[in-house]
Amino acid sequence: MRIGIVKERREDERRVAASPDTVKRYKAMGLEPVVERGAGIAAAMLDEAFAQAGARLVDGPEEALAADIVLKVQRPTEEETARLRSGQVLVGMLDPYMNREQVQTFAEKGLTAFAMELLPRTTRAQAMDVLSSQANLAGYRAMVEAMAAYSRVLPMMMTAAGTVTPAKVFVIGAGVAGLQAIATAKRMGAVVTATDVRPAAKEEIESLGAKFVGFIPKDAATAGGYARPLTPEEQAEQAKIVAEHLKSQDIVVTTAQIPGRKAPRIVTAAMVASMKPGSVILDMAAESGGNVEGSRPGEVVEVGGVRIIGARNLPSKLAPAASSLYAKNLLNFVQLIVSKDGKLAIPFDDELIRGTLLTHEGKIVHPNFQPAG
Ligand code: NAD
């Protein structure tokens, strides 16, 4: 059975879905890894390394896209989708909530498609949890970019010429990315505060030595461990606290997300206007609607001396590290659907399969993506 890895073709995507290390493991599982030449170059994984690990290198995407199992980072492009055939297994971050029509196409084509972002966040799933592995790096990178855009310094510096006070950093949303952003700012010596709506996040913020600012609405965490959208009253309560706090902050990193929905708008234009000139806001949710009014993905907007950075695919900017972890996540997942003798054996009753399987045998099987009516 072949397992195919192509070069990612979406704009700004530098990651790759397998590493020489995972290719070696696939080979040991009895699979035949087929890797498109150049697939890993942007992630510092060269063709020779893949070949040494046992991959068969091929020119162009065609052969890899014809494999029994196709591994992707991002959802396939139209051209890639056109090449996929009935019975193939597709594994990747397929972004199904934003691309329901493509889910329908996967079904019509008879693909067995797994969306890795839908993996339940259970202890057993941790080794396959692509959201965690990528968000962790994204949170780090977000803080690094915000620091680089900030024209003062983060740590306190006592010099003969005088004392420089430490920067005040505020992180909005303390999930996987937010906690790593907090830890990164702490390591640099900033004075860090953070907010979230889940009670567990408050404890985690404090355990990193940052101060919690905000309020925890009742039952704001869902059974899946995610936040629910706030009511208008709760939003107003949060806005009051955030508005007051922002006035004194130098760097703000926002990471708030509600799975399957537009990101909540937390920082308004009026709040931005109240901030000190020279402050920096990095909106990690810019691509999913934006936590910050006026942020644009992939752009830096300057408003009244405040720089608003709209993040775009941060994990791709750390492609070697992000690819190694992502590749490992996929290896752990593939081990779940391939038997010891290298045959496809999908345990359809497994909660991790039920959570991620979008389409199978011509149908959309995932409950969240059933056609209307
Ligand atoms: P996410 O990307 O969905 O959201 C980021 C953060 O934004 C979350 O902490 C969320 O609570 C917060 N948020 C949402 N709306 C907000 C608002 N209006 N104001 C302020 N903050 C808001 O979250 P995530 O990082 O994917 O983590 C989600 C959950 O999954 C967490 O409970 C986390 O601990 C859990 N998790 C579990 C595992 C595991 O056990 N396998 C692994 C990773 C994460």
Image (spheres, rainbow, N blue to C red):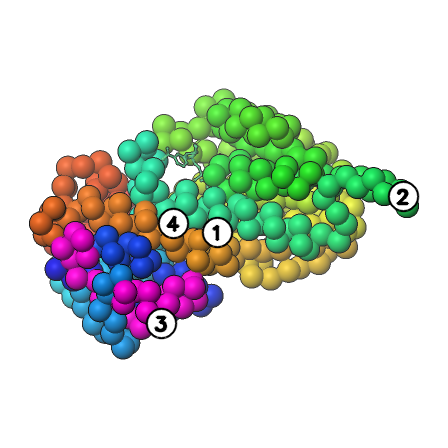
Alpha carbons under labels 2 and 3: distance apart: 52 Å
Residue 100 point in image, percent of width and height: 31, 55
Residue 277, placed above or below residue 62: above
- The response on whether ligand 1 sits within 8 Å of label 2 is no
Residue that badge 2 annotates = 160
Alpha carbons under labels 1 and 2: distance apart: 46 Å
In this view of the protein, can residue 111 be seen by the observer?
no
Q: Is residue 35 magenta?
A: yes
Amino acid type indicated by mark 3? Gly
Q: Quadrant of residue 351?
A: top left
Looking at the image, the residue that sits furthest to the bottom is 59
Disc 1: CA contacts within 10 A as few (<14), some (14-19) or many (>=20)? some
Residue at position x 55%, y 59% in the image? 297
Residue 256 point in image, percent of width and height: 52, 41
Residue that badge 3 annotates = 38
Which residues fall within the magenta stretch? 27-52
Left or right of residue 51, residue 321 in this image = right
Q: Earlier in the sequence, mark 4 or mark 2?
A: 2
User: Which of label 2 and label 3 is nearer to you?
Assistant: 2
SS for dot 2? loop
* Residue 269 vs residue 31, the one in the foreground: 31
Residue that badge 4 annotates = 325
Amino acid type indicated by mark 4? Leu
Alpha carbons under labels 4 and 3: distance apart: 19 Å
